[in-house]
Amino acid sequence: MSREQKFWGWGEPGAGPALPAHAAGVLREWLGVSGAVVSTPVAPAQVRLRDPVVAPDLRAALERAVGAEHVRDDRAIRVLRAAGRSYLDLLALRAGECEDAPDLVVAPSGHDQVEAVLRACADAGAAVIPFGGGTSVVGGVAPTRGSWETAVCLDVGRLDAVLDVDARSRRARVAAGLRLPELDHALGAHGLRLGHVPQSYEWATVGGCAATRSAGQASTGFGRFDELVAAVRCATPAGELATLGAPSSAAGPDLRALVLGSEGALGVITELLLRVRPVAAEQRYEAWLLRSFDAGCEALRALVQAELAPDVARLSDEQETRTTLAFAGDGGLAWRASGAALRALRYRPGCLLVTGWEDDVARRRAPAARALRSAGALPLGRAAGEAWRATRFAGPHLRDALLDRGVLVETLETAATWTGLAELHAAVRGALEQALAATPPVVGCHVSHLYPDGASLYFTVFARQDARDPAGQWTAAKRAAGNAIAARRATITHHHAVGRDHIPWLEGEHGALGIELLRAAKQRCDPVGIMNPGKLLPA
Ligand SMILES: Cc1cc2nc3c(=O)[nH]c(=O)nc-3n(C[C@H](O)[C@H](O)[C@H](O)COP(=O)(O)OP(=O)(O)OC[C@H]3O[C@@H](n4cnc5c(N)ncnc54)[C@H](O)[C@@H]3O)c2cc1C
């Protein structure tokens, strides 16, 4: 529990960049908002909380399990563990709506203590919500109680050790509550790194990334989080579920894969055996201008199918390119980058592509750059790529400032084959534009995780907030986008996970028998049904 975010937004108080001065003009012109601050988060004292409901026996058992000082029900900690970081979460937190905050926050320090907490909660009948970095954007850490009266937030923050490093095999055994920057820092002492860098890097934990099957910005080269996990150790109410960690195995279905993506519904991941890699001698980021989004997708398809893809490949569509350049800061690299791109855009319209090589640059970059040039990509240079890298964690900080100004800002993501990508892109954008027609939105999109057979699409939506019902406004838009995705047999989530918000589309993806199988696994691991009720599985 060392670092804490402000309760209503992203990052520690005062951290992160401010909106550039010229943003007000862009917001006025594009969205019809004034650009002035129209709402601010409530003060901590104004947050509304219910009194905690905790049976004395449960509290006593939890205190025996982890020590009294690690069983908390003070306002501050309950508010900090009340929600994740979706737009809907932020609307509620900023308004001080924390009635459903967990009754208790319990912080065990190791696997055995986690098991003891689960036993106590199963005996007393209390919901357990595992909480890593709390960066879920799908309601994954919402303290839903199911049929129980009490919600216990199981904070994994004290499970934060690097337990073992086998540099020879490039393996690290780590406790699940370790945050990604702290892990990379510790591995750095061995000349190693994980290389998993989601935009939530500053706060996400390794256990949370495993539980949600996260994908980092370099997933094209390094693989998504699943591929970085050699073995898992999970405490469930029915006992320990641990996998072996052989480099590969044919010993029946892969139980590691059952735990990855289980979102706290089966148990608590306490340890992970991770595949790590040496710290790179050289990294290289640059940017390019492609003639159109379709031309860019074709260029990326050719690259990845020829096994020439860079580790990071991020192609913005026409609207996201315009948005990126419009919001680019007025100093340093960002300005130089936008300057280069603006000059190029004057010469021809297009879409920004950022490429990043995180390893083995000399051998891999030249053939990829040749292929991009012959696909018509215009090089914008290294400063533009470095500008993206330097500002890649800025977005969530700026989101808080946009909410202050009455802007709806949210993202959603999916994935499809190369054949289906263009239609999916148009359909999701169309669904969002139609659902938000009363407050005409700006909908941009990028491709950012490449596979030989397809890619992910990541949409960012800006619109003027409907001040009367901002949550209803986004809920309707999200439903329309989700239905458009499902109608095209694309996935409802490439990396944000299911949580609470994507449950309506899950059966369409897995089928009735698939859902029954998941339910059977849950029933076996969690017979009383205390683990993260209302997440992952339909009621
Ligand atoms: C600004 C922003 C940017 C983001 N960018 C990305 C991105 O680039 N790529 C990406 O993949 N995701 C991204 N996300 C989503 C989110 O960061 C990921 O889902 C992340 O993996 C969650 O990690 P966490 O530690 O914060 O988990 P939490 O939010 O704490 O939990 C997520 C879910 O996992 C469960 N859980 C957590 N820890 C455990 C555990 N030890 N055992 C069992 N269950 C557990 C929780 O109960 C919950 O259901 C972003 C989110 C935000 C807010």
Image: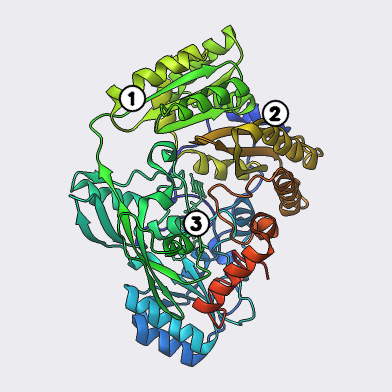
**SS at mark 3 in the image:** helix
- Is 203 located above or below residue 199 in the figure? below
Residue to which mark 3 is pinned: 212
Q: Percent from the top left, x then y, of residue 469?
A: 76, 53
> Does residue 264 show up?
yes
**Which of the marked residues, 2 or 1, is nearer the chain's N terminus?**
2
Q: Image quarter for residue 522?
A: bottom right
Q: Percent from the top left, x then y, of residue 320?
A: 60, 29
Mark 1: give few (<14), some (14-19) or many (20+) Cα within 10 Å. some
Q: CA distance from mark 2 to mark 1?
A: 40 Å
- Is 506 located above or below residue 380 in the figure? below
Q: Image quarter for residue 445?
A: top right
Please name the residue shown 26% across and 48% down the image: 185
Report the quarter where the C terminus lies.
bottom right
In the drawing, does residue 395 fall left or right of residue 113?
right
Residue to which mark 1 is pinned: 364
Mark 3: give few (<14), some (14-19) or many (20+) Cα within 10 Å. many
Q: Percent from the top left, x then y, of residue 530?
A: 54, 78
Residue closer to the observer: 349 or 85: 349
Q: Is mark 2 within 8 Å of ligand 1?
A: no
Name the residue type under label 2.
Trp
**Which of the marked residues, 3 or 2, is nearer the chain's N terminus?**
2
In the drawing, does residue 438 fall left or right of residue 135?
right
Residue to which mark 2 is pinned: 30
Q: CA distance from mark 3 to mark 1?
A: 31 Å
Disc number for residue 257 = none
Please name the residue shown 45% across and 72% down the image: 154
Residue closer to the observer: 163 or 37: 163
**SS at mark 1 in the image:** helix
Front: mark 2 or 1: 1
- Is 191 located above or below residue 519 in the figure? above
Report the quarter where the N terminus lies.
bottom left
